[in-house]
Amino acid sequence: MRKIGIWLLILVFFSPSGVFAQPSIWVDTSSGRITVRATREQLKRIEELVPGFPFYTGQVQIEAKIMELTEKATQEFGTSLERLTGLEVPAGPTGEGSRLEYSAKEGIGKLGFTFYRVTAKEKFEAILNMLLMEDKAKLLSSPRVTTMSGEVAGIYVTTEVPYLSSITYRIVGDIEIPEYNYDYATVGVILQVLPKIVGEDLIQLSIIPIVGDYEISPEFGAQHPIFKRQISPTNVTVRDGESIIIGGLIREEKIKRVVGLPILSNLPIVGRLLRSTTEEVEKRSLVITVKPHILKPREIKGRVKKVFTFKYAIATEIFKKIRKIASADGLIEVNPKEAPPNSILIRDREDKIKVIESVLSQIGTFEAQRKQRIFHLAYTSAEEAKDSLQSLLSLYGSIELNKDVNSLTVEDGAYQLSHVEEVLDSLEEHNRISQKKFFKLIYAQVQEIIPLLKDLLSPQGALKAEKGNLVVEDNNWVIEKIGERLKKLDTFNSQKKTKL
């Protein structure tokens, strides 16, 4: 907001036109928000003036570097930080800062973060470039995002790791067939940064680094990895262009190496005597740098804003595909408040917007997003689930029912399939809870019927007789199947007997 607007507001605010005891006005320049306490007449006059004020909310560009350093480079980097920040960096056998240590055998570990502010940015960049050139550091990612002052920016350098979540059993004839269900856990680095411009060249940063890792232990194997995650929020105020360094994460891994005489060690039988296996410990550090920059009006001149809403594609997946197309100063928001669901908002140069629009016209179509998936249901009736899912499908979507194996084959856009999966997961979670139902038999004897129903039970199910009734304890799907079979078994024709 311009100063002339504020002075006009104050003039109206403090004019002698009321008996309000303690009038107050507060202006948040970082978000362009005004908080006023005044009489009703004064507030009415202010409301009439505010639409004419020229508001401007600044934009902040967040540049991050995520690097992996060798043990030697970590020690050199710690020494350099002492020179650049004036802070004493703890020195130890594994390098600077707090550290993470775990072994694959023991399966234990800890994560710790240390934050540094660097003002000598030219020297700092030179040190990073030197480490990269000498192969002492590996640049894992260098993302750059732009956000409005007061809005959260997210940086994601992650991967999905599958793990065995549950085992269900499907009965085919007299055979129990196990079905392995897998879920996915996100590991890697997630940075959530909330910048607020609090001065002409001052930025208040709320930084939440989330670092996740996993290991494969001999006890549990690859299907049950051990996941570790640490969240360490911090708040710091820096000048435009100053870097924040997040360090202190060190991984220790045991690596087996085979050492032997060339060629001879590869010979069968004799080669075993000429080679040996050594175990080495390799330590590497993860270092994250965050550098905010306040974009000047001339840097964002010529930008346009456009919202894209997707019918078949998933907005979060589209974001990953097009963020590399946007300019370095461009801004992409996923599902912003002012847009419809499953949308992205892009602020960028007009030429970039046209390129992105052209790409989206190709990858956002039904043909490009058409997917097919088979859902095997363990606790829910596939026939009933099919009826519930019809409203989620697009005009091109379809569902095929397979009663024999209680499954649904769904074909539709990626967005529709994501909703189908959510609904089926909820149904399965609800129906897996054990229920109890009483069946009153008319013609059949309970003890004679029980052996004919056991093949329908799930591993945790049970059948018993209680006061002449059949009691079934199992999930809803099993109870429904037992009810259908009882309709065939508990009839006069099936139970009539000849007595001589």
Image (tube, grey):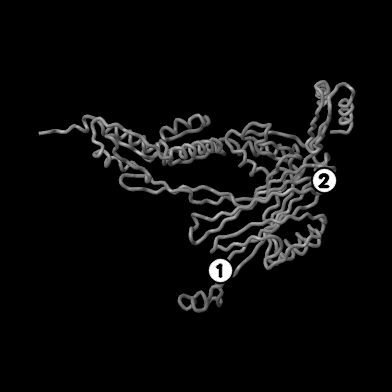
Crowd rating for badge 2 (residues with CA inside 10 Å; few <14, some 14–19, many 20+):
some
- Secondary structure under tag 2 reads strand
Q: Nearer the viewer, residue 498 or 366?
A: 498
Please state which of the two labelled residues, at mark 2 or mark 1, is closer to the viewer.
2
Outermost residue, left direction? 500
Q: Which residue is mark 2?
A: 202
**Image quadrant assignment for residue 38:** top right
For disc 1, the neighbor class at 10 Å (few under 14, some 14 to 19, many from 20) is few
In the image: residue 277, left or right of residue 458: right
- The amino acid marked with disc number 2 is Leu
In this image, 195 relative to 361: left or right?
right
Q: Quadrant of the N terminus?
A: top right
Identify which residue, 335 or 244, lies in the foreground: 244
Residue at image position (86%, 26%) is 13
Question: Left or right of 362: which side holds 178?
Answer: left
User: Which residue occupies 71% across, 53% down?
Assistant: 65
Q: Position of residue 245 (x, y in %)?
A: 74, 55
Which residue is labeled 1 in the image? 256
Q: Position of residue 477 (x, y in %)?
A: 39, 37
